Amino acid sequence: MTETAEFKYQMETSQDDMKLLFGAFDESIRRIEEELSVDITDRDGKLNIYGTEKNVKRATRLILDLIESSKAEKKLDRQKLDYGLSLAKNDRADVLVELDKDIICRTVQGKPVKPKTEGQKKYVDFIRDKMITFGSGPAGTGKTYLAIAMAVTAFKSEEVGRIILTRPAIEAGEKLGFLPGDLQSKVDPYLRPLYDALYQIMGADSFQKNVEKGLIEVAPLAYMRGRTLDNSFIILDEAQNTTPGQMKMFLTRIGFGSKAVITGDLTQKDLAVSSASGLEEALKVLGGIDDIGFATLTSRDVVRHPLVMKIVQAYEKYEKNSLSGRGRKHGRRS
């Protein structure tokens, strides 16, 4: 027991809740003990929490919210636990339950799709409320997946008549002629992440049927030129690889009854070093327009394996230090 233990709280929990909460080899409960500086024991179906009053209250609130927000899925995943701990340290663990209520849709396997962080929740709310939404942030923050979930939901509820998904094939400079196969086989590798998300949310059969009817279109950005896209849910993915001209072209394609989501990660540009990013320019140019939402996701919103969050944070730290170092050198030269 910790030396600072001076307060105790006892709560009754079911065996199912205990199993969910403790995790394999008690890993989850040990993390709560370590991060919130409490001691937790299980005696006769009762959970005893020891520590300072503030820490015990934080741990109690977190445990109750973790149990409540994990009941439907019958498991407590690492991402939710880590995010819950970060919220608990600021006395905001109740956010977990609020996030759990916002179910966008379900996959073909019945798994609920919902925002898992406050940043993702803000992003989803912008998509609901705004005609155009920019979602920028690092890999693993759910930008594309959540946008596709929102698109499928709008399509199924007949808010829009079709879904259009596009991304720049910048890796091949949008000159795909040298690749083998027909046009579709040439562009498919660049659009595969979009297909994967659609298969998971819609199912392969439903996706193929709607593609054949022309109600779902997945195409390179260059194919948007000259079109007006009415009554559509349009997603531009990997927008950091657009040029300013391509971005302007895309934004001016949006017609009546349409909604657009533009996603990208400015730290992973494949453009030439001397080329400006259309996403970066758009974020600067369009900031004052009311009906456009700007969601900036960070490493706190990463929902992939915990190692991905550590990698993103390490790169953020490195890039920040590199910029700081260049600034000091410039200052000395001045």
Image (cartoon, rainbow, N blue to C red):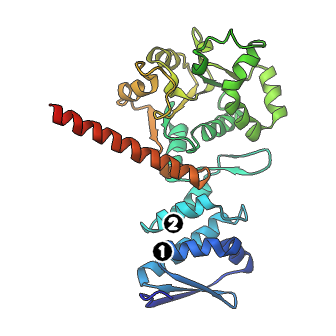
Between residue 272 and residue 19, name the one nearer to us: 272
Q: Position of residue 215 (x, y in %)?
A: 74, 23
Mark number displayed over residue 103: none
Between residue 70 and residue 42, name the one nearer to us: 42
What amino acid is found at the position of numbered circle 2 in the picture? Leu
The numbered mark, 1 or 2, whose residue comes first in the sequence reads 1
Q: Name the residue under label 2.
A: 85
- Marks 1 and 2, Cα distance to the nearest angstrom? 8 Å
Snapshot quadrant of residue 287: top left
- The structure residue drawn at horizontal position 39% and vertical position 24%, both measured from the top left corner, is 281
Residue 137 versus residue 243 in the image, above or below: below
Neighbour tally class for label 1: few under 14, some 14-19, many 20 plus, Cα within 10 Å: many
Residue 25 versus residue 252 in the image, above or below: below
Q: Is mark 2 on a helix, strand or loop?
A: helix
What amino acid is found at the position of numbered circle 1 in the picture? Leu
Residue 188 is left or right of residue 235, and the answer is right
Mark number displayed over residue 36: 1
